[in-house]
Image (tube, rainbow, N blue to C red):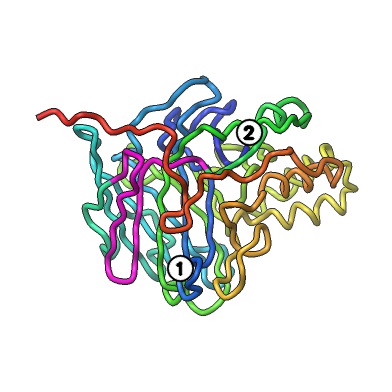
Amino acid sequence: MSHHYSGPDFGFPQGDARLDFTDLYAFPRPGDTGKSILIMNVHPSAGENPPGPTTSEPFAHEALYELKIDTDGDGVADIAYRMHFSAFERGAQTAILRRVDGPRAAGTGDGGRIIVDGAPVSMGLEARVTEAGDTRFFAGWRSDPFFCDVEGAKNKLQFTGDDFFADKDVCSIVLEIPNSALGTKEVRLWARTLTPGEGGGWIQVERGARPAQAVILVEERDAYLGGEPATDGRFLAAFAHALEHTGGYTPAEAKRVAGTLLPDVLPYDPARPASFPDNGRTLTDDAFDSFIRILTNGKVKEDKVGPHGDLLLEFPYVGPPHQSRVTQSVP
């Protein structure tokens, strides 16, 4: 699996599917390398523990969804895109997109310069896209682009090529921005979700960038999901220990390989073609195979599952959902 079901026992953070971050993608806009596409996926349409469908309400109105961007390699955000959603009423929801620059981007506030206000969230098969200056924005239900044999992963990596996600949906947040909005060199990206704290402020309940490792390698789950890339070095020993066990690495080699997985960020240089894990991640990159090869020290190379065929050639690129969640409005 990717970052899906990163809560306790393959559940959701705080038991809320809407808070579950699943995948992060970054790639140059096809046909226009002067712009980039950033995709943050959350809220799987089906759970593992407990199994069954999740709520049709796309995003938690009380939560904050963030894309973090580190421009100088110190693991601290210099830019943040913050998404806040209205209450889900009569089958509809809207979004506000804000941008924060400088030291405040590393904080946990919900302020920032408004870029998009009142953007409709897509509940049906048609993608409702909002444009604001040089930015395009989408939020709503989509076909989950992640592909993986989940049952094989749980069965000691005995893969049969059964793609668990072939008929599943997810809630996507998609941004198209000019490369100039990212700075002039390689950046590091991650995503997170936050909920209000009891005494005010915000509490981070989910975060990540690289697929699978938070679900499979992490021992201190709450500390990891509530952490920051700048302090990910504290998880190096635990990652190395897990790699020794699963891949038969020597201690020194396990430590070296663990260092390639931490900090948990996605490097992205928009001036180069995207290809996971070296530069960004496209919707067809086989990120799970990449992780499995690392996990097993090359003993297992693939799960026999490939990219989905419902991806779009234009914004928002993720395919239409398998199920429309449009409901008849109540007057």
152, 315: nearer the viewer: 315
Helix, strand or loop under label 2: loop
- Can residue 133 be found in the magenta stretch? yes
**Residue 31's spot in the image, x, y percent?**
49, 70
Say which residue label 1 marks.
78
**Structural crowding at the residue carrying mark 1, measured as other residues with C-alpha within 10 Å and reported as few (<14), some (14–19) or many (≥20):** many
Tell me which amino acid carries mark 2.
Asp
Classify residue 73 as left or right of residue 47. right
Q: Residues within 10 Å of mark 2 (few under 14, many from 20)?
A: many
Amino acid at pointer 1: Asp
Locate the N terminus and report the quarter of the image it occupies. Answer: top right
Which label sits on residue 163? 2
Nearest the camera: 312 or 261?
Answer: 312
Say the numbered circle drawn on residue 236.
none
Give the residue at x 48% y 21%. 52
Asked if the residue at tag 1 contacts the one at tag 2, i.e. Cβ–Cβ closer than 8 Å, the answer is: no
Tell me which segment is drawn in magenta.
121-144
Q: Is residue 242 magenta?
A: no
State left or right for residue 254 relative to residue 318.
Answer: right
Q: Quadrant of residue 137?
A: bottom left
